[in-house]
Amino acid sequence: MFKPKHKAPNIRLFDSHCHLDFPVFDNDRDAIFEQMRKVGIEGVLIPGVKKENWRFIRQLAAIKPGVHVALGLHPMFLKEHRKEHIHDLELAAGIKPLAAIGEIGLDYYEKNLDRKVQIALFKAQVEIAKSCKLPIVLHVRKAHEDVLLYLKTMKFQEGGIVHAFNGSMQQAERYRELGFKLGFGGAMTYERSVKLRELAKNLLLSDIVLETDAPDMMPAGCEKDHNSPLNIFQNFNTLVELRNESAEEIAQQTTQNSRVALRVS
């Protein structure tokens, strides 16, 4: 397990994107939650990626302090989604507590995913979020221009989080205008990620939220076969090294940013 460099009592972090519902955590999920509490990870968002995960995520939120829920239909699981799942999401969105609709978005990196079907699914879920006045959690790969266009033309004003942001500074500014925060995780810890590290260094601190995307997106030097939310401190330490603000200020601001974006206390 990665041990945090910064152990001051006021270093409290929020993992804005973590899939602790995935089966890879079945054997040690409770132990991870306990360790998160001990090291100062005070909040985590678990976004649903397909309907079959939604119930379990809600169950985790009901029994684990600091767990917040987003529900959505992820573009990577396009073949598993059914038309009726949109109606199911409409119903689920009316059941509180619910922090956001997500993880939703467009993925143009994967060539075997039908773009027209993705777009229709994405727009339907944005409409649900809009009608329920909920923020959204976005998955975007090689599709920022289209996502920004649809959000603008659909007049979506609830904001949210762009998970694992990898766009340009100009796109970051346009997301900011729409009320979004930008997620930075394990990819930032690799020195070869020059563009991403420049973004993390130069964006307004008020734009940034931390995430792990566990079990994916392992940070540099991670020796396990999958990522863990406990590695949020490695991502945090990288952000501290890249920026001029103090560790305490970065911890406080990024945690506040997550809570503001998701409207959770």
Image: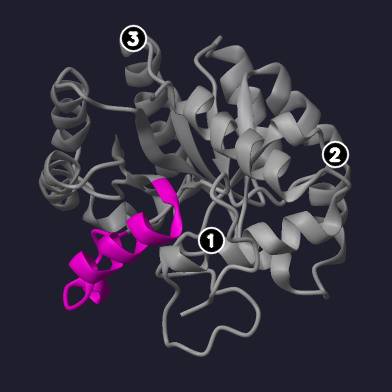
Dot placed on the residue nearer the N-terminal end, 3 or 1: 3
Which residue: 48% across, 45% down?
Answer: 14
Which contiguous range is marked in magenta? Answer: 20-42
Q: Which residue is mark 2?
A: 169
What separation in Å lies between label 3 and label 2 (alpha carbons)?
30 Å
Q: Which dot marks residue 232?
A: 1
Q: Which dot marks residue 129?
A: none
What separation in Å lies between label 2 and label 1 (alpha carbons)?
24 Å
Q: Tell me: residue 189, above or below residue 239.
A: below
At mark 3, the secondary structure is: helix
Q: Tell me where residue 36 appears, x and y as whole percent.
A: 37, 59
Q: Amino acid at mark 1?
A: Ile
Residue 117 falls in image quadrant: top left
What separation in Å lies between label 3 and label 1 (alpha carbons)?
33 Å
Q: Nearer the viewer, mark 2 or mark 1?
A: 1
Q: Tell me where residue 138 appears, x and y as whole percent.
A: 50, 39
Q: Which dot marks residue 131?
A: 3
Q: Main secondary structure of the magenta part?
A: helix
